[in-house]
Each structure stands twice: as structure tokens, then as C-alpha cells.
């Protein structure tokens, strides 16, 4: 099925990265170093946990990161509509009935996504590439058991248009990469739940 995939992209133009004045290279470097100094223990703990196969997902199923609200202001997201081809787990094309049955059942399912790279912005491409890179590192880590891999993958929420309805795909985790030069954004995701 060819449809619109709605990708949330951080709006870098909304002023969240405005420091009130122009910073010199030294001031910016000092600011970045100070941030690193405050968070390096958490980063080291995260890397160590991953190496030992310990999940970095807390009991609330949230990804562990710095919890200081001052360091993580609420970022503004823009929705970017991109063109996508969708397939089921057997590479068969999906249709409206496929999605509506999963929405009604509320069950988990696998979806293969092939995004048209000509319809995505630079910011959207960066968002996807970072998510894919981090997911591939977890998927290809042979020292981790499969259940730890699945819990450690970053979940993202997306939406797609099915007919005239917007279907929300919740906690999507990339579980396999099929990308190549011709299709740089082709991968399989597990969709935990879908709702209208």
C-alpha cells in the first residue's frame, strides 16, 4: 500500500537552541564540556549496562536518560508527511482491511516500511538515520539475548493515512534492516498497538 507516513521531526527553528546572544567558540565549548561533565557517569553506566546485557529500559518502559528538566526542555515537533510503501511480514502489500483488523483487535504486528527518500527533508532524514543506527547496533549485538534486544530498542510513535483516517502506530521498534542504496529507509518494525 502506498500512503502517507507522518514523521515527527524536532523543530530546530523554534528558538530552543537560542542562547540569547552569540557565543564564542570557547564559551560554547565550555558549555558543552560542563554538560558532559554532569552526565558522563550516566553515559558510562548506560554503555556498561549494554555491554553486560542489562536493559536500559526502566520499569516505566521509558528510555533512561538525564532526568533534569532544565537540561531537556520540551522540544517542539513538526509533523512531516512522507511517501511510503507498506508491506506485511511476508512482503505482501497491505490494505485498509489489514490495518482496521489490527486496530479492532488491538494486537501487536509486524510492518515492513519502505520510505521514498525523495519526499523526506534533511531533518527528517537525520531523525530516521539516528533511530535506525541506534536500533541496528542493538539488533546486531550478538552478546545480547533476543528478549533484552527487544526491550532495549527505542520505541517511536508514528502515524499513517489509511483512506481518510489517521492511524497511530504506537511504540514502533525497528527489528530488521532491509536498506540498500536504492531503498535507504527500508526496515521492519514491530507495532505494539494501533489506534484511530
Image: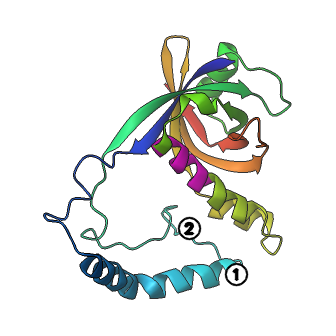
> Is 26 left, or right, of 180 in this rendering?
left
Where residue 117 sits, quadrant-wise, is top right
Q: Is residue 125 magenta-colored?
A: yes
Q: How is the image coloured?
A: rainbow
What residue is drawn where x is 50% and y is 80%?
43
What residue is drawn where x is 50% and y is 64%?
63
Query: How crowded is the residue under tag 1: few (<14 C-alpha within 10 Å), some, or many (20+)?
Result: few
The image shows residue 27, relative to residue 10, as above or below, that is below
User: Which one is in front, 185 or 4?
Assistant: 185
> Is 129 left, or right, of 65 in this rendering?
right
Label 2 to label 1: alpha-carbon separation: 14 Å
Image position, residue 26 (x, y; %): 28, 82
Q: Helix, strand or loop at disc 2? A: loop
The image shows residue 141, relative to residue 89, as above or below, that is below
Q: Is residue 89 magenta-colored?
A: no
Query: How crowded is the residue under tag 2: few (<14 C-alpha within 10 Å), some, or many (20+)?
Result: some
Region in magenta: 123-131
User: Which one is in front, 26 or 129?
Assistant: 26
Residue pointed to by mark 2: 57
The image shows residue 3, relative to residue 194, as above or below, that is above
Residue 51: assigned label: 1
> Is 175 left, or right, of 24 in this rendering?
right
User: Which one is in front, 128 or 181?
Assistant: 181
What residue is drawn where x is 60% and y is 51%?
129
User: Which one is in front, 62 or 34?
Assistant: 34
Count of numbered badges drawn on the protein: 2
Extreme residue toward the right, this view: 90
Label 1 near label 2: C-beta < 8 Å?
A: no
What residue is drawn where x is 79% and y is 64%?
140
Where residue 56 sits, quadrant-wise, is bottom right
Query: Which secondary structure dominates the residues rendered in magenta?
Result: helix
Amino acid at each position: 500500500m502506498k500512503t502517507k507516513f507522518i514523521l515527527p521531526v524536532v523543530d530546530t527553528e523554534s528558538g530552543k537552541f537560542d542562547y540569547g546572544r552569540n557565543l564564542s567558540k570557547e564559551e560554547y565549548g565550555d558549555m558543552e564540556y560542563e554538560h558532559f561533565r554532569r552526565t558522563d557517569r550516566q553515559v558510562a553506566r548506560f554503555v556498561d549496562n549494554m555491554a553486560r546485557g542489562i536493559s536500559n529500559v526502566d520499569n516505566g518502559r521509558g528510555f533512561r536518560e538525564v532526568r533534569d528538566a532544565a537540561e531537556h526542555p520540551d522540544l517542539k515537533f513538526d509533523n512531516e508527511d512522507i511517501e511510503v510503501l507498506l508491506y506485511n511480514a511476508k512482503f505482501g502489500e497491505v490494505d485498509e482491511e489489514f490495518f482496521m483488523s489490527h486496530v479492532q483487535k488491538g494486537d501487536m504486528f509486524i510492518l515492513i516500511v519502505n520510505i521514498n527518500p525523495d519526499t523526506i527533508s534533511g531533518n527528517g532524514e537525520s531523525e530516521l538515520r539516528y533511530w535506525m543506527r541506534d536500533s541496528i547496533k542493538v539488533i546486531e549485538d550478538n552478546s545480547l539475548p533476543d528478549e533484552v534486544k527487544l526491550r532495549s530498542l527505542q520505541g517511536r510513535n508514528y502515524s499513517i493515512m489509511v483512506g481518510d483516517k489517521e492511524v497511530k502506530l504506537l511504540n514502533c521498534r525497528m527489528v530488521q534492516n532491509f536498506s540498500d542504496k536504492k531503498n535507504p529507509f527500508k526496515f521492519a518494525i514491530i507495532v505494539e498497538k494501533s489506534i484511530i
